[in-house]
Image (cartoon, rainbow, N blue to C red):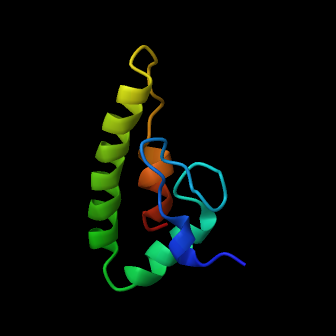
Amino acid sequence: MTTFEGHKPLRPSWRCPACGILWPCSAAKLRLLGRYREDRPGLLAYLASLQEEAKADLTKLNPDTKLPDLAPRFVAWAESR
């Protein structure tokens, strides 16, 4: 069984080393929601900063490829509904 700690992003690919899928995976999202339970603006700011780091890393990995919009992956899922 994998702990939540194993669900941190593997850089520079920004994949989950435990799941192998794009980060944030479901386990990472649950961990982040729990950690920022009382601070949704703080969570959104944190995710936006990670989005910028991911954009820089992924651009270096794929300099000739236009990146997709990373906002749905990094920030939109955490916005209040």
Residue at 44% over, 41% down = 70
Residue at 36% over, 37% down = 57
**Image side of residue 62 versus residue 17, left or right:** left
Image quadrant containing the N terminus: bottom right
Residue at 37% over, 43% down = 54
The picture places residue 67, in percent across and down from the top left corner, at: 45, 27
The picture places residue 64, in percent across and down from the top left corner, at: 42, 13
User: Relative to residue 68, is residue 16 depicted above or below?
Assistant: below
View extreme (top): residue:
64
Residue at 63% over, 62% down = 18
Q: Quadrant of residue 46?
A: bottom left
The picture places residue 62, in percent across and down from the top left corner, at: 44, 23
**Image side of residue 19 versus residue 31, left or right:** right
Tally the numbered discs.
Answer: 0
User: Relative to residue 19, is residue 73 depicted above or below?
Assistant: above
View extreme (right): residue:
1
Nearer to the camera, 22 or 34:
22
User: Relative to residue 28, is residue 75 depicted above or below?
Assistant: above
The picture places residue 4, in percent across and down from the top left corner, at: 56, 76
Nearer to the camera, 65 or 78:
65
